[in-house]
Image (tube, rainbow, N blue to C red):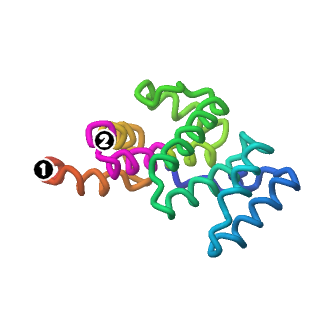
């Protein structure tokens, strides 16, 4: 299965967003440079707590502000929501290739988003010094994405240089 094959599929940002929440996300974008983005984003989250568009905006805000614990919490929420919507196990450790194959039949774009959330979580955990958890997530991602279409192998090689030697052998 090619995780990059999602042509014609609806993506998270194609989902309709409540007009008020959409206006708040736009206001946050406008106010980012002035330091007034967080308030509108949090208000948008209250209005649309399950909107991936809002969660991605909030995640990006926290990430670019170097507020990694907050970004981690948002990414965990997005992973949980997409797991629910794709009927995947909420615990990423329980994910199997069969789960991924079934989810691909439901919504390939959402599945790809889910797996990219897992990669984002791994990266944040690594940055926060939680190396074992981050590495475990990357290994799980490689187990599910054998073609490395999402680039987890390169990230794992940065934190586990000896793995590069194992892969080459």
Q: Residue at x 63, y 44 (%)?
A: 110
Nearer the observer, 29 or 40: 40
Identify the image quadrant of residue 122. Answer: top left
Q: Which residue is labeled 1 in the image? A: 162
Residue 133, relative to residue 20: is it above or below? above
Residue 51: x and y in percent read 72, 45
Q: Which residues are magenta?
A: 118-133
Pointer 1: residues within 10 angstroms few (<14), some, or many (20+)?
few
Residue 133: x and y in percent read 32, 37
Q: Does the magenta run of residues contain 151?
A: no
Identify the image quadrant of residue 77. Answer: top right
Q: Which residue is labeled 2 in the image? A: 130
Residue 63's tag is none
Helix, strand, or loop for circle 2? loop
- Tag nearer the camera, 1 or 2: 2
Q: Is residue 1 visible?
A: no
Alpha carbon separation for disc pair 1 and 2: 19 Å
Q: Residue at x 50, y 58 (%)?
A: 63
Residue 155: x and y in percent read 31, 55
């Amino acid at each position: 299965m090619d995780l990059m094959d999602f042509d014609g599929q609806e993506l998270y940002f194609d989902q309709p967003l409540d007009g008020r929440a959409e206006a708040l996300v736009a206001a946050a974008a406008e106010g980012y440079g002035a330091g007034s983005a967080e308030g509108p984003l949090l208000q948008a989250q209250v209005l649309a707590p399950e909107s991936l568009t809002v969660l991605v905006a909030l995640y990006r805000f926290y990430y670019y502000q170097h507020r990694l614990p907050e970004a981690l919490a948002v990414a965990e929420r997005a992973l949980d929501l997409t797991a629910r919507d794709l009927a995947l196990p909420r615990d990423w450790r329980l994910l199997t290739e069969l789960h991924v194959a079934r989810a691909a039949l439901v919504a390939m774009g959402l599945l790809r988003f889910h797996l990219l959330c897992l990669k984002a979580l791994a990266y944040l955990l690594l940055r926060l010094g939680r190396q074992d958890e981050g590495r475990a997530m990357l290994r799980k991602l490689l187990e599910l994405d054998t073609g490395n279409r999402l680039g987890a192998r390169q990230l794992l090689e940065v934190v586990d240089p000896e793995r590069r030697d194992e892969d080459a052998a």
